[in-house]
Image (cartoon, helix red, strand yellow):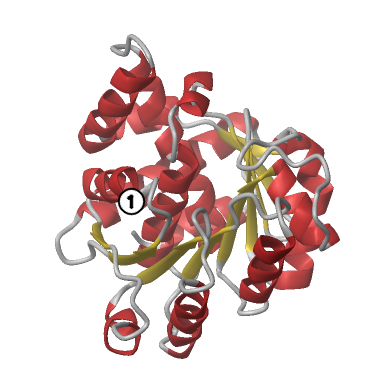
């Protein structure tokens, strides 16, 4: 994708329709880049046991190449070869944490983008401390729900935590996300009915998706992996890549919902829809706007 697509966004088109069209073109350009054989990114995924299957299949459907490598012994050799690293703390253990930190450090040294999913960050002190330690390693993007982002900003365990489920809408965490972005230097994405993306100054909302996604385990994990793939192909524009990935995933879910009868069939049709997305559909359905 040429930088002129990003430049068009930065030039602040005059109308909302112009802005929406620019975002749609950018979203398609990212997906197209992921699909091309010479730019298809290798994404190393250190993710939880529950999500591995869906994460790998979503990346494959989008055109990326997933590598589920989490052994510390392999990280020095393998992580520099990946175009992006994805770390997810869902089934966190003391044995896995050192490998996560090592991989993040190697990614930084190799100038590779990496993306953090701080699953249930406020559920326990161990989990929170682990996420805060990873945050000090300056992830390119952090994607969580409203409660997870608030926990990271506050740095305290949430006594009302519902585990992986959020007690807060994404729109309730906008200011927290902006503050966390400024403090961490990361792009912060907050998932919800409207997916919020901010770099601390700019804020956009990706408005694609369907409520039934909440009934399928690991869809949040999968979309974070897709963010890593999109950032991999254009690492100098992580804000735009993050919004584009969230919207494209949402578009695929909307198309999949047309054939789905429930959560299980939506999971299948989501993967099929992501694999089959074409330019006309993306340009027509992508919905990203300023918040």
Task: Please indicate, yes or no, whether residue 284 appears anywhere in the rendered image.
Answer: no
Q: Position of residue 43 (x, y in %)?
A: 32, 65
Q: Position of residue 126 (x, y in %)?
A: 68, 65
Q: Identify whether 208 is placed above or below 30.
A: above
Q: Identify whether 98 is placed above or below 49.
A: below
Query: Residue 258 vs residue 175: left or right?
Result: left
Q: Position of residue 64 (x, y in %)?
A: 25, 56
Residue shown at 26% from the left, 27% from the top: 268
Instruction: Count all numbered tags in the image, as a single digit.
Output: 1
Q: What residue sits right under mark 1 in the picture?
A: 52
Residue shown at 80% from the left, 37% from the top: 172
Q: Position of residue 131 (x, y in %)?
A: 65, 66
Quarter assignment of residue 179: bottom right
Query: Residue 6 vs residue 248: left or right?
Result: right
The quarter of the image holding the C terminus is top right
Residue shown at 57% from the left, 62% from the top: 141
Query: Residue 85 vs residue 81: left or right?
Result: right
Question: Alpha-carbon neighbours of circle 1 within 10 Å: few (<14), some, or many (≥20)?
Answer: some
The quarter of the image holding the N terminus is bottom left
Task: Give the residue at the far left of this rendering.
Answer: 37
Instruction: Kindly state the secondary structure of the residue where label 1 is placed.
Output: helix
Task: Give the residue at the far front of this rendering.
Answer: 94
Q: Nearer the viewer, residue 109 or 248?
A: 109
Residue shown at 14% from the left, 61% from the top: 37
Q: Nearer the viewer, residue 49 or 131?
A: 49
Q: Identify whether 13 is placed above or below 16.
A: below
């Amino acid at each position: 994708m040429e930088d002129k697509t990003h430049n068009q966004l930065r030039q602040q088109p005059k109308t909302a329709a112009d802005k929406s069209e620019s975002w749609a073109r950018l979203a398609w350009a990212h997906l197209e880049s992921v699909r091309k054989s010479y730019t298809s990114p290798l994404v190393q995924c250190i993710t939880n046991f529950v999500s591995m299957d869906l994460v790998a299949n979503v990346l494959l459907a989008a055109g990326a190449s997933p590598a589920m490598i989490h052994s510390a012994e392999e990280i020095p050799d393998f992580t520099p070869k990946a175009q992006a690293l994805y770390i997810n703390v869902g089934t966190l253990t003391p044995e896995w944490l050192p490998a996560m930190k090592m991989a993040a450090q190697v990614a930084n040294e190799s100038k590779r983008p990496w993306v953090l999913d701080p699953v249930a960050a406020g559920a326990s002190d161990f989990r929170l401390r682990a996420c805060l330690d990873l945050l000090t390693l300056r992830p390119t993007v952090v994607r969580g729900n409203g409660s997870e982002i608030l926990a990271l900003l506050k740095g305290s365990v949430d006594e009302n935590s519902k585990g992986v489920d959020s007690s807060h809408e994404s729109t309730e965490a906008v200011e927290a996300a902006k503050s966390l972005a400024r403090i961490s230097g990361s792009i912060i994405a907050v998932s919800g009915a409207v997916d919020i993306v901010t770099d601390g100054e700019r804020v956009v909302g990706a408005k694609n998706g369907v409520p039934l996604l909440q009934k399928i385990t690991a869809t949040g994990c999968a979309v974070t992996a897709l963010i890593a793939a999109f950032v991999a192909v254009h690492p100098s524009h992580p804000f735009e890549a993050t919004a584009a990935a969230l919207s494209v995933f949402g578009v695929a879910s909307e198309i999949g919902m047309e054939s789905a009868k429930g959560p299980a069939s939506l999971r299948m049709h989501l993967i099929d829809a992501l694999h089959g997305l074409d330019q006309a559909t993306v340009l027509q359905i992508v919905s990203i706007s300023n918040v």
